[in-house]
Each structure stands twice: as structure tokens, then as C-alpha cells.
Image: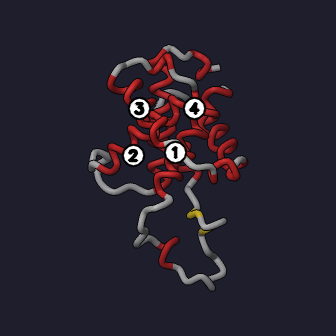
Amino acid sequence: MDSFINLAKQGYQAYEGSQSNVSRTGGQEYNAPHHSGGSHQQSGRPEIDEDEVVNTASREGSGDSSLFSSALGYVKQNRDEHERPVDEEHVQNAHRKAYQEGSAGDLSASSMGSAAAMQVLKKFTSGGSGGAGSQSQLISFAMAEASKLFEQSGWRGLRQ
């Protein structure tokens, strides 16, 4: 379980890092005036729909909702770790090993999470996600992809 939580954390960090230089438009969380008391942002980050993340990840991935709920809780409790820069070369190498070479089992949990997050980002940016998705959907799919990659690579600690 710890391996999966680390994997989810790395996936979420890779996702947030990929979003840091994106010009954001649209969406209630971005268009609300700064003085509106019910802002959906904390520390400059839009809120994610935790129920959507957990339900979608458990539906699409390899694991039950309690696994994804625990992983998401761990990620949210460690938000300070999301401020570290993402090593893009490392993420690209991990993705290549996992998805082109088929050797995900040789990767660490954090590298596997990064590879899964990049795979989902590729699907989203190429239109393979069935259209534009929310941040909650993106995180859900990254967690689901990570769980599938864990299972396919032979990491059996996922189901503990």
C-alpha cells in the first residue's frame, strides 16, 4: 500500500508540475473574482472533487475505492512536496521504459507513478480522453493508470 501511495503522490506531483506553466482560461474556479468569499481555491490551486477522483479511479483502475481514497488523502496531506520541480527527463525516461520497452517492473514506485501520469497526460492532450476533462478526471485517470501499471508489472503490494 505504501508503494501505491508513493506512486499516487508522484503521479499527482507530475500532473501539478505539468500544469504550472499552462495559460488557464475558463472554468468557474478561474473566473470567480478574487473577492468572492466562496472561492474554490486553496493556495492558488483549484479544488478537486474527491468523490469523483476516488470513484473514477476505482472504476477504471485496479483497486477498490478505499485504496484510492487513502492514496488521495496522503497526497493532499503532503501538498508541500508538490512545490518541488519535476525532473522532466526522469519522467520521460520512466515513461519510455514502462510503455515502450515494457519494463515497468524495473522502475521504482515513484518512477512508475510518473510514467503513468505522463501516459494519461498524453491521452488528455492528444484528445484520447474523449474530450476535455476536469482536473479531477485527470487525477482519477492517472491514479487508475498507475494501479494498472503496478499490476501489469508484477508489483503485488498494491492489493495489500
Find disc 2 in the rendering and name its residue. Answer: 121
Q: Are marks 2 and 4 in contact (CB under 8 Å)?
A: no
Q: Quadrant of the C terminus?
A: top right
Q: Secondary structure at mark 4?
A: helix
C-alpha distance separating marks 3 and 4 = 12 Å
Q: Quadrant location of residue 121? A: top left
Q: Residue at x 55, y 45 (%)?
A: 12
Q: Secondary structure at mark 2?
A: helix
Find disc 1 in the rendering and name its residue. Answer: 14
Q: Amino acid at mark 3?
A: His
Query: Does 86 sit above or below residue 44?
Result: above
- Is 37 or 117 nearer to us in this picture? 117
Q: Are marks 1 and 2 in contact (CB under 8 Å)?
A: yes
**Whole-percent x, y for residue 3 in the image:** 63, 26
The first of marks 2 and 4 along the sequence is: 4
Q: Quadrant location of residue 41? A: bottom right
Find disc 4 in the rendering and name its residue. Answer: 110
C-alpha distance separating marks 1 and 3 = 12 Å
**Whole-percent x, y for residue 65 in the image:** 58, 36
Q: Secondary structure at mark 1?
A: helix
Find disc 3 in the rendering and name its residue. Answer: 95
C-alpha distance separating marks 1 and 2 = 10 Å
| 157 with respect to 119 (left or right) | right
Query: Does 99 sit above or below residue 24?
Result: above
Q: Are marks 2 and 3 in contact (CB under 8 Å)?
A: no
The first of marks 2 and 3 along the sequence is: 3
